Image: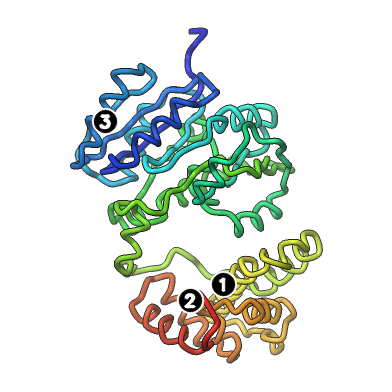
Amino acid sequence: MPNAPELTIVVPVWNAGEFLPVCLASIEAQTFPGWRCVLVDDGSTDGSGPVCDEWAARDSRFSVIHKENGGASSARNAGLAAADTPWVYFFDADDAMAPCLLEAALTTQKQFPRDLTIWRSTSDWQEFQALPGMPRTHRRCTQDEMQLIFLQIALHTGVNTKLFRRDILTEHGFSFVDPDGRKNAPGEDALFSTRYMQLFLAGPDQGFRYLDEPLYFYRRDNPHSIMTNLKKAAPAPRAEMDEVPEAGYVHTLNREFERRMAAFPDFFSGEQAFPTALHYLHCFAYGVWSARELGERLPADFFCWPAVRWCLETCAATHRYYVFYWPFCWKRPGLIARLFYAERTRSPWFYRVQAALRLLPGPGWKA
């Protein structure tokens, strides 16, 4: 078939009727014509299902799957099973994409097939609408540099900022899995995306092609979204944590910190410094927990290492609070390890300690 579509857009839909027309209009407006869209109505009760049917009736590129409510992972899996094109893109029903997104992404991905094309998102509607057209430039980033960029941009581990090769998904049996077995638990897309990136970038000298334009609009004001509902109630505790301890991790991390600071100094200064500091402080907390689990001794001068001091000084200089800030200032490895474990298992104790420690910095600090 000469006009066979190259890309399937999978859209899980659940009670998104207020935002769905904007989402579907942004798909219909794509400058790249070779797409088909699978709308998965996940048991909506607000009239979203009929809206999907109306769009499918007027544009044959849209098709609809109606199913009982099973959550975002279940809906994405149903859409993925219906995909029959070389590329798959997962798109959320309350968001919007720039008209040039698919053309820019697929053109770049085909031009540089060994690199993974990824683009920036924004939750600022005015910034999104101000995009002039096709991205002016793209740049190649090493995996090291891209990981630092990930700390700065939204949805970095989500599925909305990259295309997926269906042959990779099929060969490795990809599916979305709800963390903890709970429907609509946060993070199901991050698990899927992270595993895909690890497979895609497994070869030597592979990296990213970064489109530094806000091609994706991420809506934060949907009252039915997973993240909105997550903020209304603490996550359910986990019986176990996903991480396993790694021997000598604090030394490995310290070497990585020094290498990246020398290679990419911009991420360690100005507005980009705090997200970098937060990331490394959390990683050092994992290192402290690992050492405690494995019976390793931390270096006697660990809390005086320049990398650790830089993280703490950056938090203080920016007046930004982080739960591990005070335990590191107090040089309390036992408290750090316990806090890390409590955070990863979502212990109620962690949230109580977090609330208490937030009171210590005083006025002028913000989370």
Front-lying residue, 230 or 25: 25
Instruction: Say left or right for 149 vs 243.
Output: right
Q: Is residue 199 above or below residue 290?
A: above
Which quarter of the picture shows residue 275?
bottom right
Residue in the image at 29% along x and 52% along y: 224
- The mark found on residue 340 in the picture is 2
At x 71% / y 78%, what residue is drawn? Answer: 310
Q: Secondary structure at mark 2?
A: helix
> Would you place residue 351 above or below residue 93 in this image?
below
Label 1 Cα neighbours within 10 Å, binned few <14 / some 14-19 / many ≥20? some
Q: Secondary structure at mark 1?
A: helix
Q: CA distance from mark 1 to mark 2?
A: 8 Å
Residue position for label 1: 282
From the top left corner, tell me how far across and down residue 142 is, in percent: 72, 48
| In this picture, residue 108 sits left or right of residue 54 | right
Of the pair 14 and 164, the residue shown nearer to us: 14
**What amino acid is found at the position of numbered circle 3 in the picture?**
Val
